[in-house]
């Protein structure tokens, strides 16, 4: 995902992926014994914070393991033993719908288990070690496996105990097959995609818009930000989170990333939420030497709470020296990564003032930023 944070915390039309996934299961009203989220140790604190912020305090959070199988085992191990069925869902599948979920649950009650799947749209070929085609498989016999996968708790627990840390197990349906159980497939949807790459985020947004979540009343706002910092010796020059090779750096309470500061002001301004001086005052010692990319993530979180997401951003950095062209693409990628959007939504440009003004005299660097935010109908 080219993201420094877990993809499930990235905003999808203003709402974190994990929140969308959990809400679907919670809103179904089908899980009397509750919902369990399994997460890694590094994400434990943020998981508690995010779920609490979105009113999902009653969700149980369990620490995962070194493999997917171990993590699922930890999760089902926390399920009440009086539970009949357990549904196992990829957190990164936030587009699961109630009809798909309930159809799978009906099949599980009738057959004993159910795994959501769709027909393969592509022709599949089996190849050898030298990538030569060995066989063309019959597409009508093939299915692409999704989640949820629903099993009797007693049976999936036994399968995990019997084949603990088994090699080559990629999902729980495969584990049940290995245990000699017949696995039944329930009809899924191509829209029930798993968020794996930045391109998947774009597709997911379009699917939500097609469903009408954001098209009935799409609200857009434009914000402008401006910042300037003085160039001094014995400071690193940081722009858009990228360290620039130069003899001087920018003076400021934080890392003085003038470009990031202008961008944050534009984002906050578009959302009518003040400016960075209000949220991160230079009188607060917590922000002395602060990494502006971490502040940018916090601004992204603040605007996402109001339902806003960045549609696109355009920055113009003004300085005579150093030459910034070699760093532009790294700057774009850095900003996109910390905001959680595709890099194609971020523009960074650099220009000089032909030796005029404080920028032209090499006394400082300034940046103008323009941002468009969008908010869908569900936040109107």
Image: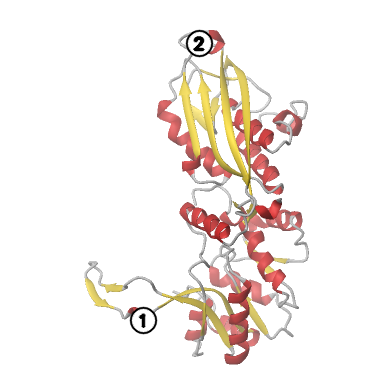
Name the colouring of the figure.
Answer: secondary structure
Rendered view: 217 above or below 294: below
State the residue in front, 223 or 6: 223
Is residue 7 in view from this perspective? yes
Label located before the other in sequence (2 or 1)? 1
Residue at position x 53%, y 48% in the image: 3
Residue 91, how many percent across, how many down? 59, 64
Q: Closer to us: mark 2 or mark 1?
A: 1
Residue 285, how many percent across, how many down? 75, 30
User: In this view, which residue lies farthest toward the front?
Assistant: 216
Residue pointed to by mark 1: 140
Disc on res. 122: none
State the residue in front, 147 or 310: 310
Instruction: Check if mark 2's residue and mark 1's residue have beta carbons within 8 Å.
Output: no
Q: Give the secondary structure at mark 2.
A: helix
Quadrant of residue 98 in the image?
Answer: bottom right
Residue 177, how many percent across, how many down? 48, 85
Q: Residues within 10 Å of mark 1 (few under 14, many from 20)?
A: few
Tally the marks: 2
Determine the CA span between mark 2 and mark 1.
67 Å
Rendered view: 13 above or below 237: below
State the residue in front, 248 or 19: 19
Disc on res. 360: 2
Q: Is residue 53 left or right of residue 270?
A: right
Is residue 291 in view from this perspective? no
Q: Give the secondary structure at mark 1.
A: helix
Q: Residues within 10 Å of mark 2 (few under 14, many from 20)?
A: some
Residue at position x 21%, y 69% in the image: 132
Rendered view: 327 above or below 90: above
């Amino acid at each position: 995902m080219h993201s420094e944070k877990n993809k499930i915390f990235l905003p999808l039309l203003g709402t974190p992926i994990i929140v969308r996934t959990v809400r679907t299961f919670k809103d179904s009203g089908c899980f009397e014994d509750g919902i369990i989220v399994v997460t890694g140790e590094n994400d434990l604190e943020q998981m508690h914070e995010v779920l609490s912020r979105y009113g999902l305090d009653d969700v149980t959070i369990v620490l995962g393991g070194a493999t997917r199988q171990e993590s699922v085992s930890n999760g089902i191990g926390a399920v009440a033993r009086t539970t009949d069925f357990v549904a196992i869902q990829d957190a990164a599948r936030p587009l699961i719908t109630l009809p798909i979920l309930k159809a799978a649950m009906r099949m599980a009650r009738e057959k004993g288990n159910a795994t959501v799947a769709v027909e393969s749209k592509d022709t599949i070929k089996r190849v050898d070690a030298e990538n030569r085609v060995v066989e063309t498989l019959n597409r009508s016999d093939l299915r692409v496996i999704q989640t949820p996968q629903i099993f009797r708790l007693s049976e999936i627990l036994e399968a995990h105990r019997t084949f603990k840390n088994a090699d080559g197990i990629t999902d729980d349906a495969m584990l049940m097959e290995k245990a000699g159980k017949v696995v039944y497939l329930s009809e899924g949807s191509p829209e029930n995609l798993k968020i794996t790459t930045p391109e998947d985020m774009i597709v997911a947004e379009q699917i939500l818009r097609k469903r009408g979540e954001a098209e009935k009343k799409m609200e857009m706002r434009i914000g402008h930000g401006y910042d300037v910092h003085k160039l001094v010796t014995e400071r690193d020059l940081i722009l858009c989170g990228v360290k620039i090779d130069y003899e001087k750096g920018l003076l400021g309470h934080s890392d003085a990333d003038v470009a990031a500061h202008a961008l944050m002001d534009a984002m906050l301004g578009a959302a009518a939420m003040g400016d960075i001086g209000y949220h991160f005052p230079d009188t607060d010692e917590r922000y002395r030497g602060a990494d502006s990319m971490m502040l940018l993530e916090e601004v992204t979180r603040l605007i996402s709470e109001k339902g806003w997401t960045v549609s696109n951003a355009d920055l113009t950095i003004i300085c005579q020296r150093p030459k910034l062209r070699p760093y532009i693409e790294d700057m774009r990628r850095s900003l996109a990564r910390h905001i959680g959007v595709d890099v194609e939504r971020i523009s960074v440009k650099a220009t000089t003032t032909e030796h005029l003004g404080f920028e032209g005299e090499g006394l400082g660097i300034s940046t103008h930023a323009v941002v468009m935010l969008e908010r869908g109908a569900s936040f109107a």
